[in-house]
Amino acid sequence: MKVVLLTGASSGIRYQTAQLLAQRGCKVYGAARQVKRMKPLQKWGVIPVELDMTDEKSMESCVKMIIENEGKIDVLINNAGYGSYGAVEDVSLEEGRKQFEVNLFGVARLTQLVLPVMRKQQAGKIISISSVGGKITTLFGAWYHATKFALEGFSDCLRMEVAEFGIDVVLIEPGAIKTEWGSIAADHLLASGKGGAYEEMAVKTEESMRKQYTSNLLSKPERIAKVIAKAGDRKRPKTRYLIGFDAKPILLMKRLLPDRVYDKLVKNML
């Protein structure tokens, strides 16, 4: 039985992935700050674990407990993360650092903690949920995109380092998904722009984001969960899985168009 540690398991893609993996026979430790939100997952056999991706002791305790209970960790799914939108001038460095702590440094530390046991096993998979936003940019998303671009580079380097130990490193790159992520990002944008020089543009962007993330065209979390599960099951998974509504078209647009033309198109989409 595969032992899986999945972070951010309390909502969205993460919740669906925990359920799917448990149904497929994996022993899943679903980790998040809000343990109560994971309680319904227990009926599928998921074990809820409290985990704060910005707290060193919390991460150490989580990994230590799983290794003591199971003697191994086969798959680490780095799924915790959030998007804090706002103009660079308006978003505080404290908020920027917090986003890096969750979206990158927490991932890095948890990876460091599971690598010794995976090396000993001579096997393992580290699957990180990036985004098409790790390759393209959107208006007011500087800090979010910076974390995802960084996660892409981090994972590419890690993949080369650990390959000889039988460890696979995989990036999942979803496009727009029908989850609460969009409304959270929009809330941050509205709050950060209030009363500032970018307020008018921020309000317009916030309205567009809410409209987009309530659209029925968006991919459902279950679709992404299936891809994550497939990557965890495969003996030799792809290094990247680009999936979801608008992911491939917008990436193609970014690659083909000159920067200023791309910028103009993105702003005109509001």
Image: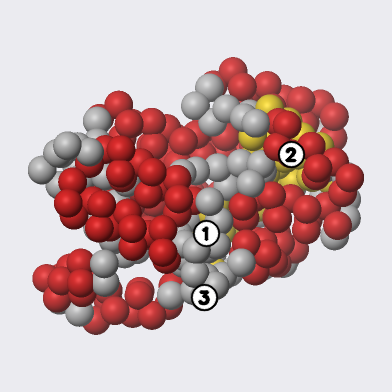
Horizontal relation, residue 146 to residue 113: left or right: left
Q: Position of residue 214 (x, y in %)?
A: 50, 63
Which disc, if any, is residue 38? 2
Q: Amino acid at mark 1?
A: Leu
Q: Nearer the viewer, mark 2 or mark 3?
A: 3
Which residue is at the front of the view, 195 or 168? 195
Q: Position of residue 119 (x, y in %)?
A: 66, 42
**How is the rendered protein coloured?**
secondary structure
Mark 1: few/some/many CA within 10 Å (<14, 14-19, 20+): many
Q: Which residue is mark 3?
A: 217
Task: Decide which of tag 2 and tag 1 comes sooner along the chain.
Answer: 2
Q: CA distance from mark 1 to mark 3?
A: 23 Å
Q: Residue at x 26, y 67 (%)?
A: 270
Q: Amino acid at mark 3?
A: Leu
Q: Which residue is mark 1?
A: 171
Q: CA distance from mark 2 to mark 1?
A: 24 Å
